[in-house]
Image: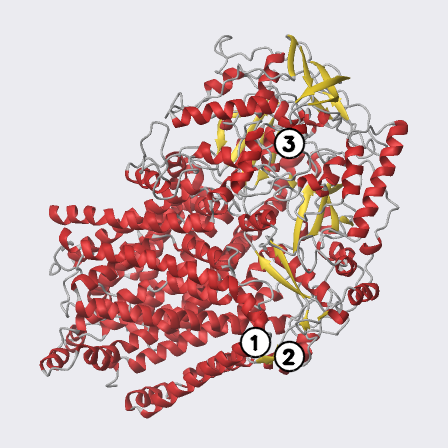
Amino acid sequence: MGQVRETGPLTENPWGCSSSVAEGIRGKTSIAGLGRSCLSLLSLLLALAGCTNNPYREEDHLHRVRYSSIDEDPKSLDPSFAYDSLSLQMVAPIYDTLLQYAYLKRPYALEPALADRMPEREVYAYEGELSPPAQESDLEQEIGVPVPEAEPPAERKTVRREAFRYRITIRQGLRFQDDPCFEATGGKGREVRSDDFLYAFKRIADPLVTCPVRAILGEKVAGLNGFYFANRKRIQGQRAAGLEPETDYSIPVTGLRRIDDSTFEVCLTEKYPQFLYWLAMPFTTPIPREAVEHYDPVRFPGREAFRDHPVGTGAYVLKAGEYRKGQRMVLERNPNFREERYPAEGEPGDREIGLLADAGKLLPLVDTWVFTTVKESIPHWNLFRQGYLDTSGIPREFFDRVITPEGGLSRSMEEKGVRLYRAKELTTYYFAFNMDDPVVGKNVKLRQAVSSAIHTAEYIELFLNGLGEVAQSPLPPGLFGYDPDYRNRYRRFDLDSARRLLSEAGYPGGLDPVRGQPLEIRYDTAQNDPSGKQSVRWLVRQLEALGIRLVVILNDWNTQQQKADEGNFQLIGYGWLADYPDPENFLFLLHSENRRPGVNYANYANPEYDRLFDEMKGMSNQGEEGEKRRQIIARMVRILEEDCPWVPNFHPESYSLVHSWCGGVKLHGPANNLLKYARVDPERRAKLRGEWNRPNYPAVWWSLGILAAGFLPAWWVAFRRGR
Amino acid sequence: MLTYVLQRILYAVPIVVLVALVTFMLFFMVVPPEVMARRHLSAKNPTREDIQNWLEKHGYDKPLFVNLETANGGQTRYADSQFVRHLRSVFLFDFGKSDQTGEPVRDILLRHMGPSLMLMVPAFILSLFLDIALALLIAYCRGTYVDRWALVACVLLMAVPTLVYIIAGQTLFSLVLRLSPIAGWDDGLQAAKFLYLPIVLAILAGLGGSIRFYRTVMLEELTRDYVRTARAKGSRESRILFRDVLKNAMIPILTSAVMSIPFLFLGSLLLENFCGIPGLGSRLIDAINASDFAVIRSLVFLETLLFILGLVLTDVSYTLVNPRVRFEGTPLNRMVVPVLLGAGAVLAAGALVRTGVRMLHRAPDAGHLMQKPWILENLVTAGVLALGLFLLHQACKRAYWREAFRRVAQNRLALVALGVVGLYTAAGFLDSISWKDAATDLRPRSLLDRVFRRDAERRERTYSSPLALEEFTGRPARPLENGPHLLGTDSTGEDVFYLTLKGIRTALMIGLFTTLLIIPIAAGMGIAAGYFRGWVDDTVQLLATLMASIPEILLLVALMTVLDRGLPQLCFALGVTSWVGLCRLLRGETLKLRDLEYVQAAEALGITTLGILWRHVLPNVMHLILITFVLRFSALVMSEVTLSYLGIGVGPGTGSWGTMIDGARLELARDPVIWWNLASAFGAMFLLVLSFNYFGDVLRDALDPRLRER
């Protein structure tokens, strides 16, 4: 450390009293001079800025552009990796899928997109390994997690059973977007072939891609896990030898069969009708191998990575040079997009709100999408109010008075022409009890008491503006098997019966007889933002009414996840967002096969429930089988009601506030590729924005005046002193 | 000069290694590799196999420090460990790839550095000019009502949380005046329209503190002999101020300003987040939130280098303004002991934190065993109270303090301020003594709860505005269950007046315990460094540099995550991050004192070193400690707001102004606005900070030996 003496803010100047030591500072020696230079700098800045609050460049204003926002950069634009909602939202418009959800139809239904027609299904006899090869279980033993001894190891080797096989035919004349990676065609997008799909399937099981759904699809598609483990071994060997690891795509996958250039077959390992939904997700989109190999910064230093440079077949392409991280993303119409037209029929009522006005028009309707990064919600909301964002996508707590009790809009919003659209989400928020906990896990009455004491209806009214529904079971409305008339006995808010149940549970008045103190239940949550804190405090109050003390443990996201996996909690709050609209995607959350560290955080295990689930999962929703499936689901839901491993909390509603120049909007739960259906009226937007954002010069003069008046006394005193 | 630069560069090496060690240990304590993998695999529920695969792919499967495994070839590659990899990447300036996006970290840094600089450099230059101009004006008007009100205005400016500046500024400039965009960014000159509002806000946010500091510096200059001489010769007052005083005051001003230049690179977190500026400050928070170790370690490394650069710049600027100071680096042989001691201290601190965490994990069980944990709290409170009274009693017996009290008492406003502080303290103590009436009581109720029983127990369902009779929602007006509330109710229907009262204890505890933690550490180390010099000084300086080079936010987040949330932990974390300033201050002062005649006389008389330190040095730096206590105290009370914004404030169930003010992020965006929550918390905080600061200023004058003749 240098031995130069330091002067803190309060020490005496150690160098005595010479008045001419400061050599480096000449010039600015009067207030007037300082003030003048400040003013000139300020005026320069103002002149540069031009007096407008428009965050975009002026010339953007009149095109068919839509302005939207994202709150951070998407994690990845690699279709085999993107799984969080933001990344999916950006990937889906770029990478078209084999099937898609029909935009206007409800209940949700699939329709062919890249596929020529719906895949043909047949039953065949699958023969092969049931579970992944031994490596995975070895690994688990190494880490010290007990492997469930459900099946004897001998049976694990081979299995023979009926399974589904899908034959998929793709449309003729599909082409990828133009991109320099297509060197053979001089940058023109080449034709899409069935190999591109098979490559994408293999890519799911590429250990270097770390695809988030590898564990699920690897098990469902025959031979895909074999491909994964073979490559894993290979890569481990390459790493040990100090080589750059590389995946070998020539290893065959038994379940993937190429028939010809436009047809291929996928063989599954079981009867898994939900497979079709996976064909509507970007994981199974065609991926041109050239692009992955071209955009590889390891081999070609300086090039963009594939995850930042998507090459797809979708309605939009990422505009070159306009992916500015932390700033904005721009999507542009893909000239090579297949000929798709706006749907001509919808639900009753769709025509009235103008949803069918564009029927038959070529998609996409909007040429450009600008996604600006806005991290905080207050600027976001203000930008929407100014008309600089076309839609709002901000937390519902914001519009306390924007939304009236009838679910309509307040007058101030209506005067602006803003419209509100709502839709039920395929999401369930729940509290899970730890079934291994000696207090809450072993005492069903206690769980039922807690469940009865949580007044979710009030929560929805106070915090969600009534946009939501009290959950009776894990199944959200809009799903097959959801029964609108079903009422869970322990989800009726009833303090008296809750108190009675609590006494029966051995805690009369909430008093823990052993400790002589009120019963304490630990609640783990990662809700650390202001709105989360409010809802946590609300929950504490609910249980106080029972005389139970809820000890809130605020975790960061990592710790929360770790605690859930380890089972180090009593009560924990979670939500599940459906991958696809099938009850199987919710009910499996409580299957004992998915116990921790799986998604069954409660560690709930009920053999009867498991048996019913296994029976239900492969059944069809149609006809007699559908009716039987419905009954099985009802029985499963009743088992959950009695055992109460969860307190199903609520199903939220999604909503969107939209400016008048955007026309009608229909919200959709599972689909992400809806940008192509959106519209805009640029002239109207330009006119309204201009009206709303004219600079307010009188107010400017007033504020300057007040500021100047604040300094007057100082000038006056200084002036008098000077004399 | 060349030797100096060389020595400096060599000096940076051990610092960088130590900082790397600290970052590495902290990060992997907070985020074990497995958790990191879970975080980056976007799967809802990754399997063990997927996690292992990710770890291998990113190289996090290696052992942490030493690799003892024998590779295939039969040889053991000891250096093939994560720490070695980490160090290598740092020293080769090869920052590697982001764990989250796979992008080269160098690109990320280059991309985000520009916008941060474009915001911070103009803000820095402009605020320097503006602060000095205003401070001069106020110094010129000293002793008049302008001076007094300017002090109030400064404290007001200081007490307003940055968050409120930003929200109010954006509302005024963009929604009311409609002159500037709320948020956004563009390239080149186009960025100007996004920049001038944040620049104005950045200047405004720092204005109060800087003006106060500069005014103090200038007033100190005004007591010097040359000023008296100039006055005697008949120079005009304005001429003295602008020509002589300003030049001399520039020394401390410049040196303090130069130190902050390197940090301009890192930008400002809040401004960048709210104004949509893609800068490094906001990127660091993203990286912390996303557990992106590759980015974090690079930013920390960069900050260390910048900090050392700052030290060099300070030295250079010293020699520029004062030719009597010469460059003096640290010779290599003098670095060995400090580095060894520093490393030892770092490891010891790590071990201490570890043990602390273990004990905390056991603490709940201990609480259960004790059955009545609040009894301990009451005992501690009584102890603190007794200690305070004892100190007061002792002080009253000494002439020095009696004289100080007499001088404070002459100022009536100071007495009012003291009264306000006393009221707050009383409320804090009332809130710290609690017991249960019946076994079924959910929690012990404090004396404060009992005094304000009416407010504590009257709850509504949700918001209601002050003195309103109906709920504040759009529903068909529903009457309140328990009548009007003086300051309204909050989202869960609790009385805001009561919540504000509950915040007092938290604020006082954060201020008090943190400063009580800092002062012994800082005083011990600072005085020892200044008095003994040599290797003691070198070690202390090394540790101080080490602490100062790790971004404060990172350290706070890491400590709070490791220690779990809670008030004591918060105080500890704040204490760890904020002792450096006082330590440096005391070191500098002691360096001066030890050369003074009375210390030399004491040495000659054969008084023991400890005796000299205790009887002669400590009393003479006491006023510095006290003033730092006052200033730190209010800064700490206010820092709670930022901590709440970062999500590491106190937990729910503990009343806190920070939580209330942070909640304004939601409430101010409502339509119509919910303002009473923010206003109450802010008002209470402002009153405390203002009183404390005013009292502190008067006390400083009363204690300053040079001013005592008056």
Q: What mark, if any, has residue A153 been given in the picture? A: 3
User: Residue B75 sits in which quadrant?
Assistant: top left
Q: Kindly check if marks 1 and 3 are in contact, taking CB atoms under 8 A apart as contact.
A: no
For label 1, the residue is B374
Q: Could you tell me how far apart the alpha carbons at marks 1 and 2 are, in whole angstroms? A: 9 Å
Closer-to-camera residue (A333/B610): B610
Q: Kindly check if marks 2 and 3 are in contact, taking CB atoms under 8 A apart as contact.
A: no
**In this rendering, which labeled residue sits more in front, label 1 or label 3?**
3
Q: Is residue A401 toward the left or the right of residue A312 in the image? A: right
Label 1 crowding class (10 Å Cα cut-off): few <14, some 14-19, many 20+?
many
Chain for disc number 1: B
Q: Kindly check if marks 1 and 2 are in contact, taking CB atoms under 8 A apart as contact.
A: yes
Give the amino acid at mark 2: Lys
Label 3 crowding class (10 Å Cα cut-off): few <14, some 14-19, many 20+?
few
Can you say which quadrant of the picture contains the C terminus of chain B?
bottom left
Report x, y in % for residue B634.
43, 70
Closer-to-camera residue (B384/A436): A436
Can residue A671 be seen at all in this image of the molecule? yes
Chain for disc number 3: A
Give the amino acid at mark 3: Pro
Element type at mark 3: helix
Report x, y in % for residue B303.
33, 48
Element type at mark 2: loop
Asked if badge 2 and badge 3 are on a common chain, one would say: no
Asked if badge 1 and badge 3 are on a common chain, one would say: no
Q: Could you tell me how far apart the alpha carbons at marks 2 and 3 are, in whole angstroms? A: 58 Å
Element type at mark 1: helix
